Image (cartoon, helix red, strand yellow):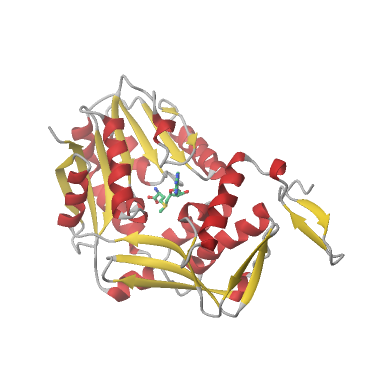
């Protein structure tokens, strides 16, 4: 057993040593990862869930993406939040518990925590465990008087949230346009679960990216330094190290394209050659040029976003955009 990869060596018929992850050597999360990978690579067209980009390396690569010139999203949203933080703090009121699904490095929350009137607690939640706890420690050291209570898990599983801080003013903070990764129906279901979480006294503060010219969008997801390409390929690197795969990352290329009809950026990994890849005892064939669809990032107009929020039982108390109308932030409360 290789402790680092969670895999077990065995001898195959051809007398070559191969690596097979044994069922018992996979953690519960890796078993789910294996199931999702098998399902996704058996589908036609092939796809993989984007949540698997994010291990420690994936989270670090995402933070590098946030610094790129082409990736206007982070700096635009951060500037907008800095402008409206005092107003947000007034709307939120005292003693709030702020819950942040997909918190990542937790950069955007910090200015808000500084502006709030005696916040009760901050609950960052993320799938990327080590990165989450590292970031939570940094935030705790900067805000010693606020309870910081990180939760590792999948934000699409609402049970993780039950029972959290029922007696406080609950605010869900969901920046970064992470909502864009959901298709419309799943976005409504997710928003609906967030509405139950905040109840009739809380609110959802959410960042949504706006539809804009193709070249701005495509460069944001296909930067000149190749960081987004490395981020996209990290999903294959994880399959190799955690599930015993043998993807050759150089045999795949990164592609990001605007799908105008669906109003979303799609990220794909294209097989450069005809090839067969093994994951444990499973084999997956790729034609030359065949794609694995790895991520959608939906883009909205203010109206299309608010219609979606309304379908989940929310209404906007206020919506803000930057001067160039690149990005939007919404303060949503439950419909009466
Ligand atoms: C687009 S990044 C946004 C990060 C940060 N909120 C920001 O605004 O910069 C998405 C974040 O959500 C996390 N994430 C993605 N899918 C998730 C899931 N299903 N459950 C929990 N966290 C998830 C990732 O690890 C990552 O930190």
Number of marks in picture: 0
Residue 58 appearing in the image: no
Horizontal side of residue 300 vs 177, given as left or right: left
Q: Is residue 53 above or below residue 167?
A: below
x, y percent for residue 324 = 20, 64
Measured as percent of width and height from the top left, residue 20 is found at 74, 54
Residue 119 visible, this orientation: yes
> 336 left or right of 210?
left
| 123, 277: nearer the viewer | 277
Q: Residue at x 41, y 25 (%)?
A: 145
Above or below, 253 relative to 61: below
What's the residue at 24%, 65% (across, down)? 211
The residue shown at (31%, 37%) is 193
Residue 96 image position (x, y, % from top left): 30, 27
Q: Residue furthest left?
A: 336
Q: Position of residue 292 (x, y in %)?
A: 50, 67
Position of 252 relative to 78 (above/below): below
Image point (50%, 69%), residue name: 229
Query: Seen from this angle, which residue lies furthest right?
Result: 15
- State the quadrant of the C terminus: top left
């Amino acid at each position: 057993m290789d402790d680092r990869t969670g895999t077990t060596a065995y001898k195959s018929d051809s007398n070559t040593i191969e690596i097979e992850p044994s069922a018992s050597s996979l953690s519960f999360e890796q078993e789910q990862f294996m199931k999702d990978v098998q399902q996704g690579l058996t589908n036609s067209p092939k796809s993989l869930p984007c949540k698997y980009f994010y291990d420690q390396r994936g989270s670090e690569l995402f933070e590098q993406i946030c610094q790129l010139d082409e990736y206007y999203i982070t700096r635009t949203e951060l500037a907008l939040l800095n402008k409206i933080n005092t107003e947000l703090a007034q709307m939120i009121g005292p003693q709030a518990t702020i819950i942040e699904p997909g918190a990542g490095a937790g950069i955007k929350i910090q200015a808000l925590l500084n502006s709030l009137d005696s916040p009760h607690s901050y609950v960052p939640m993320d799938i990327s465990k080590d990165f989450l706890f590292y970031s939570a420690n940094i935030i705790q050291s900067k805000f010693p008087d606020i309870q910081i209570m990180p939760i590792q898990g999948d934000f699409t599983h609402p049970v993780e949230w039950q029972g959290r801080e029922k007696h406080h003013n609950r605010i869900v903070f969901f920046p970064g346009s992470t909502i864009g990764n959901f298709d419309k129906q799943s976005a409504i279901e997710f928003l609906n679960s967030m509405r139950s979480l905040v109840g009739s006294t809380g609110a959802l503060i959410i960042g949504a990216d706006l539809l804009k010219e193709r070249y701005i969008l495509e460069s944001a997801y296909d930067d000149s330094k190749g960081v987004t390409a490395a981020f996209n390929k990290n999903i294959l690197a994880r399959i190799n190290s955690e599930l015993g795969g043998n993807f050759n990352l150089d045999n795949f290329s990164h592609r990001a394209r605007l799908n105008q009809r669906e109003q979303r950026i799609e990220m794909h990994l294209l097989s450069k050659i005809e090839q067969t890849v093994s994951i444990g005892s499973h084999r997956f064939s790729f034609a030359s040029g065949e794609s694995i669809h790895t991520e959608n990032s939906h883009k909205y107009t203010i109206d299309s976003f608010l219609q979606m929020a309304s379908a989940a039982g929310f209404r906007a108390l206020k919506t803000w955009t930057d001067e160039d109308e690149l990005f939007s932030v919404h303060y949503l409360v439950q419909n009466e």
